[in-house]
């Protein structure tokens, strides 16, 4: 007489369990990819603003160490003939860094600064500069632009316009001062609608960064009536 031996069932997974595991893994991978993409989009603007701040510090230090003026041009903020000229000289560049070649022999002649090439490439890849707003002039130039007080009884003459470059630019001087300027930065990614404002104070060299409100978030619905009585009155 033979006795049938019952072998223990081997542990395993059913087809339904395997499908559920695959679905969970795919969902987790999708969440990781989405979060990484969102982080990458916002990181471009943040890194671009950081690079702009670093460029300002570099230009200020380079002017002080070489004894020559350093000028940063912003081709994207130009229009008309100026934009065409800058685009031809530095195609595809968001910024252009130049230095006075020979302050004594050839004053006012500026050439590109090779040491700033990494900043120019990085900023041009990350952000665009949509607006350049000039601030107060440097301390050494502000005293010259102050108009003398008008004599009593005479018509006040219109204030003289401060001299400015033909291009939107900011200049740093060998004495450590510079022009005050505020830049409006936008990301190269169309999916990031944020804007950064980077402001540099020429006299002190302090730099301030501010994240502006998202334009899409400013569109709000009209406020509701404060009370039920006001709601009834409006009907």
Image (tube, helix red, strand yellow):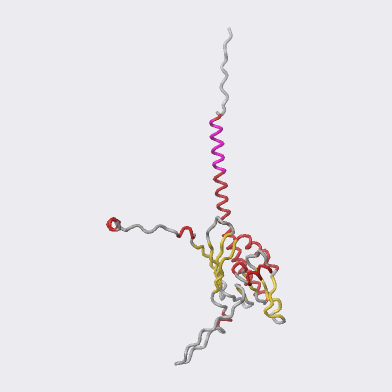
Over which residues does the magenta segment extend? 16-29
Q: Which residue lies furthest to the top in this view?
A: 1
Image-based side of 49 in relation to 103, left or right: left
Q: Nearer the viewer, residue 89 or 43?
A: 89
Image-based side of 184 in relation to 106, left or right: left
Image quadrant in which you'd find residue 29: top right
Rendered position, 149 above or below 94: below
Horizontal and vertical percent for residue 52? 60, 65
Q: Is the magenta stretch mostly helix, strand or loop?
A: helix
Horizontal and vertical percent for residue 203? 56, 76
Horizontal and vertical percent for residue 209? 53, 65
Horizontal and vertical percent for residue 137? 56, 78
In magenta stretch: residue 25: yes
Q: Residue at x 63, y 65 (%)?
A: 94
Rendered position, 227 above or below 9: below
Which quadrant of the rendered structure holds the C terminus? bottom left
């Amino acid at each position: 007489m033979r006795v049938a031996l019952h072998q223990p069932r081997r542990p395993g997974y059913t087809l339904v369990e395997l499908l559920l595991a695959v679905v969970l893994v795919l969902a987790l991978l999708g969440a990781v990819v989405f979060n990484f993409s969102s982080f990458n989009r916002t990181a471009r603007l943040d890194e671009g603003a950081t690079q702009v701040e670093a460029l300002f510090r570099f230009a200020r230090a380079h002017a002080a160490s070489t004894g020559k003026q350093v000028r940063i041009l912003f081709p994207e903020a130009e229009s008309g003939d100026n934009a065409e000229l800058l685009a031809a000289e530095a195609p595809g560049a968001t910024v252009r860094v130049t230095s006075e070649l020979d302050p004594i022999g050839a004053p006012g002649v500026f050439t590109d600064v090779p040491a700033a090439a990494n900043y120019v490439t990085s900023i041009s890849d990350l952000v665009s500069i949509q607006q350049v707003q000039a601030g107060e002039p440097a301390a050494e130039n502000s005293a010259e632009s102050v108009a003398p007080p008008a004599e009593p009884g005479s018509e006040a003459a219109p204030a003289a316009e401060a001299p400015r470059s033909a291009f939107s630019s900011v200049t740093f001087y060998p004495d450590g001062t510079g022009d005050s300027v505020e830049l409006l930065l936008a990301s190269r990614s169309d999916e990031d609608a944020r804007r950064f404002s980077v402001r540099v104070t020429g006299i002190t060299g302090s730099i301030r960064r501010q994240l502006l409100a998202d334009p899409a978030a400013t569109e709000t619905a009209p406020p509701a009536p404060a009370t039920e009585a006001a709601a009834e009155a409006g009907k």
